[in-house]
C-alpha cells in the first residue's frame, strides 16, 4: 500500500480511536441458512472507560446457546461445544437470540464500529436465526471487516486468510481459536493493527463501511474471474456486509 489505493478525503475521527465492538459466532454449520448459533460474543473496546492498572480492559458479553438441534460432531471438533453440553448449560435459543439481537442493535445504534471477521457469514446466520424466532434484525452498519481490509491492502499475499492467519500476519495473539470471545477480541485487534499500519484506513466508521461495500464487490469479481478459468459457471457473491 505504498501508493494510494483509493481517492478519498476522510472527515472526522477515525473509527479505531473510538468505541469498537467485536462480534463473533460459533455455529452448527458453515452454511448460513441452516446454521444454528451455539455461542456468541460481543467484546467492547471503549476509550471512555476508566483505565485500570493495565489500561482499559475490553468488556465481554458471552452467550452459550442450546440450539435445539443436534450439534454435528465435525463442528464440535472445531469449537468444542457438544450437544450434551449445550443442552445442559446453554440458554434456550429463542431467549439467547433475542438478547444477542438486542445488544447488537444497541451497539449499532450508538454508532460503535462493529468488527466482524468475514461479516457476511456471521450476520447472515444471525439474521436467519432472528427470523426463525420472530425477531427484527437491525440495519448492519457500521461494520468493519478485517478480511475485506486485509485483501485490499495486501492483495497478492499467498496463503490462507483465516482469522488465525491474519493474527499471525499482524502479530496478534489468538488465545483460543474458534471460541467466540477470543475470536471477537482478536478481530478487533487485527482491525486496529490494519488501521495503524495503513493510515488510509483511518476514517469515521460509516465512511469506511461504505467503501468496504465496493471493495468486497471488486474482490468477489476478481475471484470469480479467476475461478472461471477452469469453472466457467462459477459465481461468487460480492454482497457485503450481508
Image (spheres, helix red, strand yellow):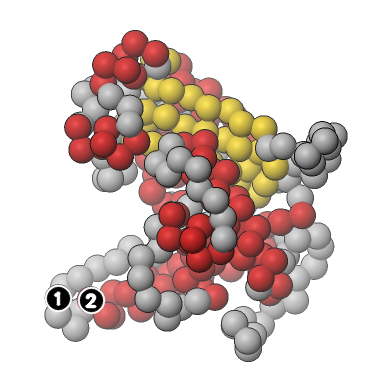
Q: Position of residue 38 (x, y in %)?
A: 37, 28
Q: Position of residue 127 (x, y in %)?
A: 42, 38
Q: Please tell me which residue is depicted at 40% across the width and 63% down the height of the picture.
A: 161
Q: Nearer the viewer, residue 175 or 242?
A: 175
Q: Quadrant of residue 48?
A: top right
Which element carries disc 2, helix, strand or loop?
Answer: helix
Residue lying farthest bottom? 3
When the figure is inspected, residue 174 is found, relative to residue 87, above or below; the finding is below
Mark seen at residue 231:
1
Q: Please tell me which residue is depicted at 65% across the width and 58% down the height of the picture.
A: 192
Q: Nearer the viewer, residue 172 or 37?
A: 172
Q: Quadrant of residue 139?
A: top right
Circle 1 residues within 10 Å: few <14, some 14–19, many ≥20: few
User: In this view of the protein, can residue 143 be seen by the observer?
Assistant: no
Q: Check contact, mark 2 vs mark 1: CB within 8 A.
A: yes
Q: Nearer the viewer, residue 5 or 44?
A: 44
Q: Please tell me which residue is depicted at 60% across the width and 58% down the height of the picture.
A: 191
Mark 2 and mark 1: span between their CA atoms? Answer: 6 Å
Circle 2 residues within 10 Å: few <14, some 14–19, many ≥20: some
User: In this view of the protein, can residue 55 be seen by the observer?
Assistant: yes
Q: Tell me if 194 is positioned left or right of 19 in this view.
A: left
Which element carries disc 1, helix, strand or loop?
Answer: loop
Q: Please tell me which residue is depicted at 49% across the width and 61% down the height of the picture.
A: 168
Determine which residue is flagged by label 2: 227
Mark seen at residue 186:
none
Q: Tell me if 149 is positioned left or right of 21 in this view.
A: left
Residue lying farthest top? 88
Q: Position of residue 8 (x, y in %)?
A: 69, 78
When the figure is inspected, residue 203 is found, relative to residue 141, above or below; the finding is below
When the figure is inspected, residue 27 is found, relative to residue 224, above or below; the finding is above
Amino acid at each position: 500500500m505504498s501508493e494510494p489505493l483509493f481517492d478519498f478525503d476522510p472527515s472526522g475521527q477515525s473509527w479505531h480511536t473510538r468505541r469498537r465492538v467485536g462480534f463473533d459466532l460459533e455455529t452448527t454449520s458453515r452454511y448460513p441458512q441452516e446454521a444454528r448459533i451455539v455461542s456468541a460474543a460481543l467484546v467492547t473496546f471503549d476509550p471512555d472507560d476508566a483505565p485500570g492498572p493495565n489500561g482499559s480492559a475490553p468488556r465481554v458479553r458471552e452467550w452459550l446457546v442450546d440450539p435445539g438441534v443436534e450439534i454435528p460432531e465435525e463442528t464440535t471438533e472445531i469449537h468444542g461445544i457438544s450437544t450434551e453440553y449445550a443442552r445442559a448449560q446453554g440458554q434456550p435459543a429463542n431467549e439467547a437470540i433475542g438478547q444477542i439481537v438486542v445488544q447488537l442493535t444497541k451497539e449499532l445504534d450508538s454508532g460503535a464500529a462493529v468488527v466482524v471477521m468475514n461479516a457476511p457469514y456471521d450476520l447472515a446466520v444471525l439474521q436467519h436465526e432472528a427470523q426463525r424466532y420472530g425477531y427484527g434484525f437491525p440495519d448492519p452498519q457500521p461494520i468493519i471487516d478485517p478480511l475485506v481490509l486485509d485483501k485490499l491492502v495486501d492483495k497478492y499475499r499467498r496463503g490462507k486468510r483465516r482469522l488465525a492467519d491474519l493474527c499471525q500476519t499482524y502479530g496478534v495473539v489468538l488465545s483460543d481459536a474458534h471460541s467466540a470471545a477470543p475470536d471477537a477480541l482478536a478481530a478487533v485487534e487485527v482491525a486496529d493493527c490494519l488501521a495503524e499500519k495503513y493510515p488510509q484506513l483511518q476514517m469515521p466508521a460509516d465512511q469506511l463501511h461504505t467503501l468496504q461495500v465496493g471493495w468486497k464487490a471488486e474482490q468477489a469479481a476478481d475471484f470469480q474471474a479467476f475461478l472461471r478459468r477452469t469453472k466457467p459457471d462459477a459465481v461468487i457473491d460480492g454482497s457485503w456486509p450481508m
